[in-house]
Image (tube, rainbow, N blue to C red):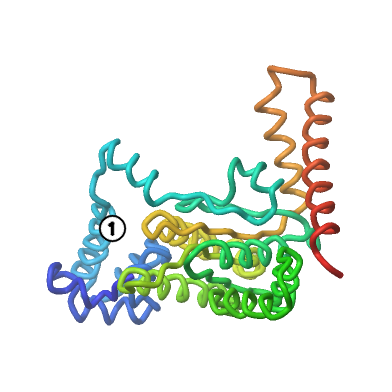
Amino acid sequence: MAPLEALEQDFRLIDSSFRIFCAAHGIFTVEDFLVHDLYELEAFAERDYKQEKLKQGIRQMVSILEHKHKPWLNGMELLEDAEVNKCTLSSGWERIDVLLQGGLREGHITELVGPSSSGKTQVCLKCASHVARSYSGMVMFFDTGNSFSAKRIAQFLSLTSGAANIEIKKTVQQVMSSIVCHSIFDMFTLLDMLRQLKNNLTSQVGCQVRMLIIDSLSSLIAPILGGGGVHGHALMLTTGFLLKELANEHNLSVLVAAFILSFVLASMKHSYLQINSHNDSEDLILQHFNAALKSISHMLTAEAKLQIPS
């Protein structure tokens, strides 16, 4: 997002005094303003001797954000964009591709959810290796738990290739040069990296990024959700908006891994019951739900035993 200083030329209320006031509360960019509590900011403005001017500046910022939108596209333009730019990337696992109705779609976010040690990282590494090998372009891998393993990717490549050792080594070198891994351990670093990636994709020519993988988002979200405040939820929303914008505007396939908790599973069952209550009895619906979960779990376990070396 642009710094507040960049808005002064077009909006006179966003002057130096307003920016100094915002900086005193940790607001330096438009995105900082988005995630800040406006009621709290207005309360601070009322204590200042320039309260009217500062409140006008706050209303000006809100107006700018409300009226900012992308150009309208008609149906034919959207169809052409989908056919030309929104391809489907194979995950490297045939059964997962069938489950996703073709694979990982560019322009979309695919969320990989499961309990701890259920194989989410293995799926992320497999997808990274397969996309980097089979499609021209780069794979960005944001690692939040030191789980990225170049050795595991090399094992995946050696399993799927029947070539000689020299050719396998060349393939591994080529694939690894197409995967860029960054270690990220807090939400603010993730937001900075996403903004940097967005700027690079906007200005970069000749180097295409095909996939962005975040493994995993849960470890970054958990620390900021404590305390019952709205700040953590605002950061989550900002992250979601950035990921959607990156996926749609730059035709990225975004794969995000996340933990699933027991209360989330209970909520899923409750929602499933509500949606299908008019079709079958509760016991039968729960049987279908649990059978679907077990089928997916068995599928991933079988694939892992078959293709992931120990």
Q: Single out the residue that lies furthest toward the front.
A: 164
**Left or right of 298 in this view: 155:** left
Q: In the rendered image, which quarter contains the N terminus? A: bottom left
20 relative to 267, above or below: below
Q: Position of residue 173 (x, y in %)?
A: 61, 80
| Residue drawn at (43%, 62%) of the image | 242
Residue 136 seen anywhere in this rendered image of the structure: yes
**Left or right of 289 in this view: 46:** left
Residue 146 seen anywhere in this rendered image of the structure: no
**Left or right of 38 in this view: 18:** left
| Residue drawn at (23%, 70%) of the image | 54
Along the line of sight, which residue is nearer the eye, 102 or 142?
102
Q: Which residue is mark 1?
A: 65
Along the line of sight, which residue is nearer the eye, 173 or 185?
173
Q: How many marks?
A: 1
Q: In the rendered image, which quarter contains the C terminus? A: bottom right
26 relative to 209, above or below: below
Q: Position of residue 268 (x, y in %)?
A: 71, 40
Image quarter of residue 42: bottom left
Q: Secondary structure at mark 1?
A: helix
**Left or right of 97 in this view: 50:** left
Image quarter of residue 209: bottom left
Q: Amino acid at mark 1?
A: Leu
Q: Position of residue 4 (x, y in %)?
A: 26, 74
| Residue drawn at (65%, 60%) of the image | 257
Q: Position of residue 238 (x, y in %)?
A: 45, 61
Q: Residues within 10 Å of mark 1 (few under 14, many from 20)?
A: few
Image quarter of residue 276: top right
